[in-house]
Amino acid sequence: MAAFPSRLTRQIDRLQSQHHALTDRSWLALPSGRVYLLLIIMLSLAAAFANFHVRSQQFTHWKSHPEKFYVGNTPLFSTMDAGYFLGIAQSLSRQDTPNDFSARRNFPDGKTYAQNDADITPGKAPQLFTVIYWLADNDSPQALLETGNMVIPVTAAITALAIILCFGATGYWLEGTVAAVGGGLSMAYLQRSSIGRIDTDQLNLGFFICYLAWRSGLAA
C-alpha cells in the first residue's frame, strides 16, 4: 500500500517535468514593466472593441433589412422582457414610479392595491433602464427601442472591461483579456446580449465574473 503514494508522486513529478519541457520557451515569457502595461491596455481595448463591434454590426444589419427588423421606423426586440423594462423607462420619463407601472401592469388588482396602500415605498428602477430613460429623446416606443438597442454595444464593451478588471484584481490581467473576448463573444452569452435583447442579461456576465473575483479574493 505504501508503494502507491510513491508511484503517484513519481508520476506527478514526471508530468511536471514534461510540462516544464514544453512550456519553458523564451518566447513564452511575459514582458515586464511598461511593455507589460502597454500590452494589457492594447489587448483590453481590442477586447472591448470586438464586443462593441459585433453588436454594432448586428444593429447595422437590422437597419439594412427594415422589412424584417422594423415596424415602420421602430426597431423590434427579440425578448418579451423588453416590454417590461422599457415600460419602466417610459414611466420614469412621465415622472411616474416603478410602482405606478406595476399597478397599471397588474390592473385592476394592482391599482386597487396601490390605492389602499398609498404609503408603500416606491420600488427602485433597474439602473440600466434609468439610463435608457435619460438618453431617449422622448417617451415614445420608437425612441425607447432605438435607444435600448443603441445601448447594447456599449454595455457589451463595459462587460468586457469588467471581466478584465476582475481578472486583473486577482493578478491575471492578460488572461482577463482572453476571457473578455471568449466570454463576450461566446454563443452562450452572445445570444443573450445581442441587438433586440433589451434586458438585464446584457450586463449579467460582467457581474457574475465580478462576484467570482470577489469570492476568490475572500478565499485568498
Image: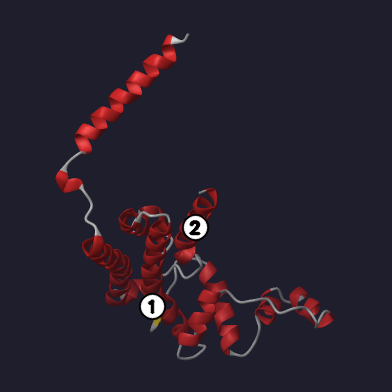
List x then y, in percent, for residue 149: 41, 75
Q: Nearer the viewer, residue 145 or 35?
A: 35
Dividing the picture into quadrants, the one containing residue 146 is bottom left
Q: Is residue 217 above or below residue 157?
A: above
In percent of width and height, residue 156 lies at: 38, 67
| Vertical arrangement, residue 203 with respect to residue 16, above or below | below
Q: Quadrant of residue 189?
A: bottom left
- Amino acid under label 1? Met
Give left or right: position of 133 versus 35.
right
Asked if one can make out residue 31 in the rendered structure from this viewpoint, the answer is yes
- Binning the other alpha carbons within 10 Å of mark 2 as few (below 14), some (14 to 19) or many (20 upward) gives few
Q: Nearer the viewer, residue 210 or 113?
A: 210
Judge from the rendering whether residue 107 lies leftward or rightward of residue 2; answer left or right: right
Going by the picture, which residue comes out furthest to the right? 116
Query: As displayed, is residue 45 above or below residue 209?
Result: below
User: Could you say where residue 107 lies in the image, as x and y percent from the top left?
Assistant: 72, 76
Q: Secondary structure at mark 1?
A: helix
- Residue that numbered label 2 is attached to: 208
State the SS at label 2: helix
C-alpha span from label 2 to label 1: 23 Å
- Read off the residue under disc 1: 150
Out of 52 and 96, give the one closest to the viewer.
52
Q: Are marks 2 and 1 in contact (CB under 8 Å)?
A: no
The answer, for residue 195, to whether it is visible in the render is no
* Mark 2 or mark 1, whichever is nearer to me: 2
Residue 26: mark = none
Q: Residue furthest front?
A: 33
Q: Disc 2 or 1, which lies upstream in sequence?
A: 1
| Residue lying at 44% horizontally and 77% vertically, measured from the top left | 148
Q: Residue 186's spot in the image, x, y percent?
A: 35, 54
